[in-house]
Image (cartoon, rainbow, N blue to C red):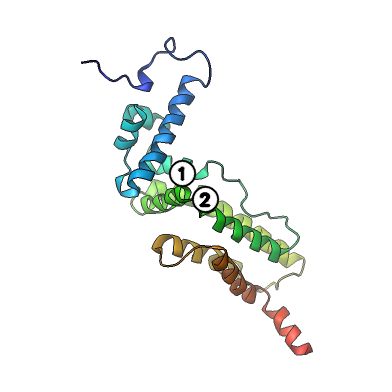
Amino acid sequence: MKQKVMRDEISPVEAPGRGRPRNQQTHDAILDAAREVLRLHGYAGFSIEQVAALAAVSKTSIYRRWPSKGAILIELYMEGLPDEAISESAKSLKAELRRYLLATVERLQDLEWRTILSSLVAESQYDESTAAMLRDKVVMPRRESGLRLLRHAQERGEIEADIDLEVILDMLFGPIWYRLLFVHARIDADFAERLLAQVNLALFYKERVGKAKKR
């Protein structure tokens, strides 16, 4: 019986003369297979073996590119994601926070991307290297951008200097992660607006008090 030939076993001579290079074809085939395994089986059924079988490559070929399941999930998550989700130089803090939250909620409507993110979080609970990648490539860059945005707002006098910026960021990001992980309530535009209203109460409380005294 004729054996199945894996993509990474094809020699350069046998590779197509046009289109993407063979290595890039293999790379893309693995990522496509990883998406499909997640779509069909979710995180519980996601494994290097399943991805290798669907992509028609060896496990060694996958491990040459990604050291773990978490590394594949990180790449899937980062594909097409802007480097700066938060615009640090925005002139209006209120407007930028609203834009960011609504864009995040809209992104989470994509079931494939949402599954990738929740799978990445789940994998980070069991694998320390995945947890480190999640912190270094996803969580911390966005928190740092958020901190710079808030500090610029303080410098402009838009918010008070004594506000705990770290806690404000937890108030912004925390409810989204909570709903994503426990799936107890919807993540939609209405939720984003309600969340923003509560964050604004903390950010602009002195402004609100000042208006109340003038009445």
Rendered position, 51 above or below 135: above
Q: Who is closer to the viewer here, 161 or 186? A: 186
Spot occupied by residue 98 in the image (x, y as percentages of width and height): 65, 63
In the rendered structure, are the residues bearing label 2 and label 1 in contact, judged by CB atoms less than 8 Å apart? yes
**Residue type, mark 1 in image:** Ile
Q: Amino acid at mark 2?
A: Val
Q: Position of residue 49 (x, y in %)?
A: 29, 35
Q: Decide: is 1 above or below 211.
A: above
Residue at image point 45% right, 47% down: 112
In the picture, measured across the screen, residue 208 lies left or right of residue 186, that is: right
| Image spot of residue 188 (x, y percent) | 53, 63
The picture quadrant where one finds residue 161 is: bottom right
Q: Quadrant of the N terminus?
A: top left
Mark 1 closeness class: few <14, some 14–19, many ≥20 residues within 10 Å: many
Q: Is residue 45 above or below residue 171?
A: above
Q: Which mark is residue 74?
A: 1
Give the residue displayed 39% in from the left and 38% down from the top: 34
Name the residue rendered at 32%, 27% in the picture.
58
Residue 80 coordinates in the image, percent (x, y): 56, 42
Specify which label sits upstream in the sequence, 2 or 1. Answer: 1
Which element is circle 1 on? helix
Residue 171, label in figure:
none
Q: Residue 137 vs residue 115: left or right?
A: right
At numbered mark 2, what does the secondary structure look like: helix, strand or loop? helix
Q: Quadrant of the C terminus?
A: bottom right
Q: Residue farthest to the left?
A: 1
**Which residue is at a point 24% across and 15% down the rendered structure image?**
2
Circle 2 residues within 10 Å: few <14, some 14–19, many ≥20: some
Q: Residue furthest top?
A: 13
Q: Which residue is mark 2?
A: 138
| Outermost residue to the right | 214
